[in-house]
Image (spheres, rainbow, N blue to C red):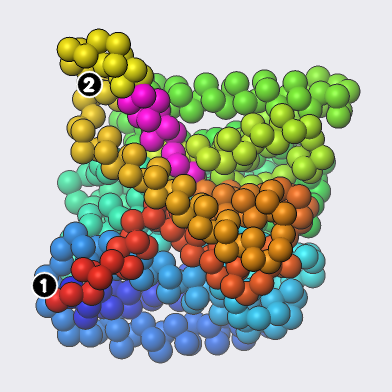
Amino acid sequence: MNWKFVLKILGRVSLVVAASMTLPLLCALIYREDPLPFLYSMGIILCVSLPLSFLPAEKHFSFREGFAAVGLIWLFIGVAGGLPFFFNGGGGFNTFVDCIFESSSGFTTTGATILTDIESLPNGILLWRAFTHWLGGMGVLVLATALLPSMGVRSQYLAQAESPGPVFSKLAPKQSQSSKILYSIYCAMTAVEVVLLKLAGMPWYDALVHAFSTAGTGGFSNRAASVGAYDSAVIDLIISVFMLLFSINFSLYFLILQRRVREALKSDELRFFLLVVALATVGVTAAALPVYGDLLRSLRYAFFQVSSIVSTTGFATADYVLWPQLAQFILILLMFMGACAGSTGGGIKSSRVLLLLRSIRREIRQISHPRLVEVVKLDGKVIPEETLRSVLVFIGCYFLILLGGGLIVSLDDVSFSVSFSAALTCLSNVGPGLQEIGPVGSFAAFSPLSKLVLSVCMIAGRLEIFPILILLAPSTWRRS
């Protein structure tokens, strides 16, 4: 393991994190708030990252180093991103563990929070909180390779370890070009949402915060009641649509820009995802109809909450904990599936669920017809058996981590619904869970151990498990 080179990459990426604090720093100055939390944080990160950035190291870099580097970088930025919260002092951040939890939740686009009085925090801190969603949504390393294409590393290894989904593909021959294309689309969609939210009646600051959170499918809001604070059907619709748009594989938008619209619309994953959204919306609308007594109103809240959960954003316009059990069960199932591969959303991913269902169908057919030779296809292409095996291994690891995380959280003597949904919502990067950790609750009551475990679950879920697991493998620490 070429640890010197891994640390050098860590230093380069940390420079990007430090530079990104310039935006909330400017916000603090505009609102005449204390800028020291950001200045202190930037200073500490620079003191660590600058020496690492110029560390002399051989440029040998393998697939193993890529996964290990990604795992270490995300663990580090989870700590570094919490520094502004720590130096801000008070406001609900009672310990540094709380700051790490909030930062990890931000960068992993989870949206789970320990805060109970969000609106008491300074605007600069709340903007940084939402901006971490935007940075982590497309990937900090994707941003780094776009800004620093000369990092001196085979950046496709980093992108492959950070990119969500069972299959990795580049949009351009060079990874730096792919990163620039992705971020161009990402920025354009974010800007459009900001303008639409402003036209719908949001202040510019609120529009920026909610656009950052929507783009990263995160869910942090500057309002205690989340999007429900605006009580606007137009705002609900805009955010619902954009939550779904950011849940779709960004490579499809690239195809559309190349005027290959038919090819994009033929995506099996896209069709499956939209079908699930439609069926879930109908189911939740019917289940919640007795609560609201009006079909259109029930449809409004159901569509928003389905879009929020399946995209793993976590915004709320209603407390779904008060809905019938059927509606809650549908939302829990959506937490498992999540968004599309290649999007900013979390969860197992729609493509993996679709491949699993098609693998099950093939297995049933082969049991009925032992001599039948059948392959699993996606978008008309044969999926290699190695990819199908990796899908099954991933889902197996997902459930093992889910059960392990829930087991540790249960040490806090909370109910099964709380411990299970806490582990699930963090591993799937959704945000709210059930009961005390629902849309109007928080994770403040958990012990420091549970918060650290859930923070690791968030990072493992965002990186799709293996970059974190590889750090635990003894072979990773060997020289050969």
How many other residues sit within 10 Å of disc 1, few (<14), some (14-19) or many (≥20)? few
**Viewer-nearest residue: 274 or 235:** 274
In the image: residue 281, left or right of residue 363: right
User: Which segment did they paint magenta?
Assistant: 346-360
Residue 28 position by quadrant:
bottom right
- Disc 2 marks which amino acid? Val
**x, y percentage for residue 391?**
33, 39
Q: Which mark is residue 480?
A: 1
Disc 1 element: loop
Q: Which mark is first along the chain, 2 or 1?
A: 2
Q: Residue at x 29, y 84 (%)?
A: 52
Q: Does the image show residue 146? A: no
Q: Does the magenta segment cover residue 351?
A: yes
Residue 68 % position (x, y): 28, 66
Q: Position of residue 453 (x, y in %)?
A: 54, 66
| Distance between mark 1 and mark 2 Cα atoms | 37 Å
Coordinates of residue 458 in the picture (x, y in percent): 51, 59
Residue 375, numbered circle: 2
Give the residue type at disc 1. Answer: Ser
Q: Quadrant of residue 57?
A: bottom left
Up/down of 175 relative to 233, above or below:
below
Question: Taking 230 as reference, is 161 left or right?
Answer: left
Q: Quadrant of the C terminus?
A: bottom left
Residue at horizontal 61%, vertical 80%? 96
Query: Is residue 25 one of those drawn in magenta?
Result: no
For residue 283, above or below residue 391: above
User: Looking at the image, which is closer to me, 267 or 331?
Assistant: 331
**Residue at the spot x=57%, y=59% of the render?**
407
**Callout 2: 10 Å neighbours few (<14), some, many (20+)?**
few
